[in-house]
Image (tube, helix red, strand yellow):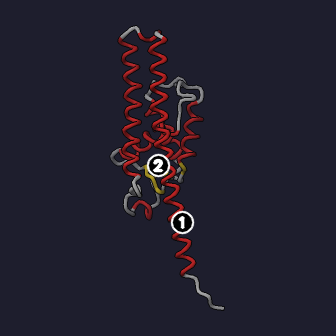
Amino acid sequence: MNGEKAITRTQFLKNAAKELLADGEPHSYGELVQFIRKRAEGTCLEGRIEVNNVWHSMRSLMEEPGSPYQKVQWGIYQKDPPQSMAAGPVLEPPDGLSEIYQIMDQAVSILDQFENCCSRVQEDTQLAGDERFAAIRQQIMQSLDTAVTGLSCWAAELEDLREKQESDLEHHRGLDGMSLSM
């Protein structure tokens, strides 16, 4: 890709995310996706970076042993977050998000496994030029991608709802703490 040694899509996504997060500042998930898409321009991945593709790579990047990359708030990622944030408890997804994330992980894994399988099968057989198999493969990839996108949207909406509820609660607590003295 761009004259570099061939790497997997997942590794490309991780490398690009690391590049953006290297500044140590918090970045939203949307920023990550936009940055990675920009990095993919001119490569075989151009136009193939979807919102859900990045999520799986970010999750596995954060789960690597000793990883300095963390989710510091819902939808916000950072390298080496400030000690006050790092010292706190590990963020657990609220209200059913954990299960959605697990399902999304499984769906992304199936998508990646299918893509790897297709690559191996095409190398081992004469299917590379067969239009029937290419059409079927494309339909399966689109269906799997649609499922992962739907799950990503579901999780994002749950996160947004949770953030709004927390914000409303904090605002309400702030109003309760105000005095009416003159």
> Which residue is nearer to you in this view: 68 or 163?
163
The relative height of residue 104 versus residue 84 in the rendered view (above or below) is above
Indicate the amino acid at tag 1: Ser
Residue 126 location (% of width, % of height): 40, 8
Q: Quadrant of residue 64?
A: top left
Q: Which residue is painted at 57% across and 78% down in the image?
A: 175
Q: Could you say whether the residue bearing mark 2 is in a helix, strand or loop?
A: helix
- Up the image or down, 81 lies above or below 144; here it is below
For this orientation, the residue located farthest to the bottom is 182
Q: Nearer the viewer, residue 150 or 12?
A: 150
Residue located 55% across and 37% down the image:
36
**What residue did someone put label 1 on?**
167
Residue 168 location, quadrant: bottom right
Identify the residue at the far right of this view.
182
Amino acid type assigned to the residue bearing label 2 in the image: Ala
Q: Quadrant of the C terminus?
A: bottom right
- Looking at the picture, tell me which residue is in the foreground, 72 or 178: 178
| Picture coordinates of residue 94, whole percent (x, y) | 41, 58
How would you rate the neighbour count of disc 1 (Cα within 10 Å): few for under 14, some for 14-19, many for 20 or more? few
Considering the numbered disc 1 on the image, is that residue within a helix, a strand or a loop?
helix
Give the residue pinned by disc 2: 155
Q: CA distance from mark 2 to mark 1?
A: 18 Å
**Camera-side residue: 141 or 76?**
141
